[in-house]
Image (cartoon, grey):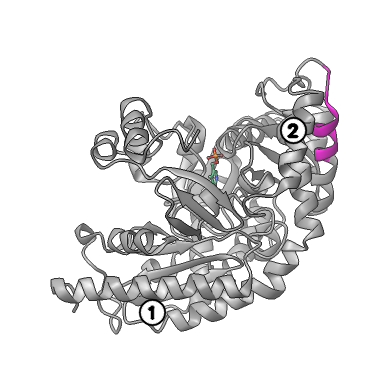
Amino acid sequence: MSTLRSTHEWQAADAAHFLHPFTDFKGLAAKGSRIITRADNIYLWDSDGHKLLDAMSGLWCVNVGYGQEALVQAAARQMRELPFYNAFFQTATPPAIELAEVLAEVAPPQFKHVFFSGSGSEGNDTVVRMARRYWDLLGQPQRQVIISRHNAYHGSTMAGASLGGMSGMHAQGGLPIPGIEHIEQPYWWEHGRTQGLTRDEFGLVAARWLEERILAIGAEKVAAFIGEPVQGAGGVIVPPATYWPEVQRICDKYGVLLVSDEVICGFGRTGRWFGCETMGTRPDLMTFAKGVTSGYVPLGGVMVGERMARVLIEQGGEFNHGYTYSGHPVACAVALANIGLIRSLGLVEHVHDEVGPYLAQQYRSLAEHPLVGDAETCGLMGALLLVKDKKSGAAFPPELEIGMVCRGHCFREGLVMRAVGERMIVAPPLVITRAQIDEMVALIRRCLDLTLADARRAGWLA
Ligand SMILES: *Cc1c(COP(=O)(O)O)cnc(C)c1O
């Protein structure tokens, strides 16, 4: 297919018919999409044959890297055997049952049950339905409010976007839906550094914003708190080590359910199977998607802790919720092969013991670059904050779009690194080697140098 048309022809057809997610349709049509045609390991190729190191794992999902034949074979085998059957009418398929079983093995011990969805957004819709249903069943129907955080990302359905704290998303389509509140994010650079707090001091302050909000609403009205262990789409915001344990203490104190959105952090990204294990929390619900299949096919879901599962099972009656593709056999077969590969390659340990610490070490050296104000990593996620003045930490004016300038250099130099405002972020496939991290970091350094040269030439520096 990809060889049949020229880049220009693909771009013309794309502009004529394909409305892309999170895109200025007109702007992209004028510029033309980059057409990605194939991939292997941690590399992509576009329709002009240009090779790119994919430091974003597609969209945070290709944990085992591209070209893994075991996943391809699993999909083909399952499609031949049974491409689809539903789980609505007292039926089930072997891959869905087996995946539920395997998820209960790899998840923290409180999780024995799973509800499948087709995506992370749908998983978070399930979270809202399930948390509120749980409190109804316990005779506390007034416990409806779910607290989340500004600059969180929990997907793009009505509930997902409402739980998320992206102001641009709330500005379109009448969001958030009722009963969702947001507190400030645990972003030390923005809210702690300027107050003269250490990271650890700030972590406690940020967690107590949750307690203050619970008390302001009334604990008897709060159903749950939801957060990503490390905020991904918000710019890889790594919370201080003190933050999550304090959040856990507060949720316990007021009986509020804790929901860990593991769509990015799950399946090894932080160096443990799930981010909550790295952060030291015991969530009641965990949303997953992305890395569960390494993005080879869509799949998501919610792990349900025993505290909730017992109530939903014993007292629940019918739960009036589900998706056509809940437990899709092909997706589940691919997830089983993917988890099998994460286990047999020892990828969680590889991140924890080997490439995670190595990335952290490389980022400490990148922190010395004149354009970098702050550098942080967690497992195989990393962020560099670009600043105008390294000494004072003063920011570039947003209209200069310094992140996009840097991102432009990355694409030209053969690196996919994402810009979130002034934060340049990476989350490479977990199969990445030390030598490939060296290659990635050399590309990052070159792009920082090129961006610095641009900024000097334009007189943007302090
Ligand atoms: C991507 C993402 C989602 C949404 O998942 P989709 O599969 O795109 O619906 C939810 N939460 C987090 C943390 C994510 O990164």
| Apparent side of residue 126 relative to residue 235 in the rendered image (left or right) | right
Of helix, strand and loop, which one carries label 2? helix
Say which residue appears at 62% left-offset and 55% top-offset.
265
At which x and y percent is residue 129?
A: 62, 30
Q: Residues within 10 Å of mark 2 (few under 14, many from 20)?
A: some
Q: Earlier in the sequence, mark 2 or mark 1?
A: 2
Residue at image mark 1: 196
Q: Nearer the viewer, residue 415 or 267?
A: 415
| Highlighted magenta segment, given as a residue range | 90-100
At which x and y percent is residue 205?
A: 49, 67
Q: Is residue 248 above or below residue 47?
A: below
Magenta portion: prevailing SS class: helix
Of helix, strand and loop, which one carries label 1? loop
Type of amino acid at the residue the image marks with label 1: Gly
Say which residue appears at 26% left-offset and 79% top-offset.
389
Q: Is residue 182 magenta?
A: no
Residue at image mark 2: 76
Callout 1: CB less than 8 Å from ligand 1: no
Q: Nearer the viewer, residue 432 or 113?
A: 432
| Picture quadrant of residue 143 | top right
Callout 2: CB less than 8 Å from ligand 1: no
Q: Is residue 365 above or below residue 113?
A: below
Say which residue appears at 68% left-offset and 20% top-offset.
320
Q: Is residue 94 magenta?
A: yes
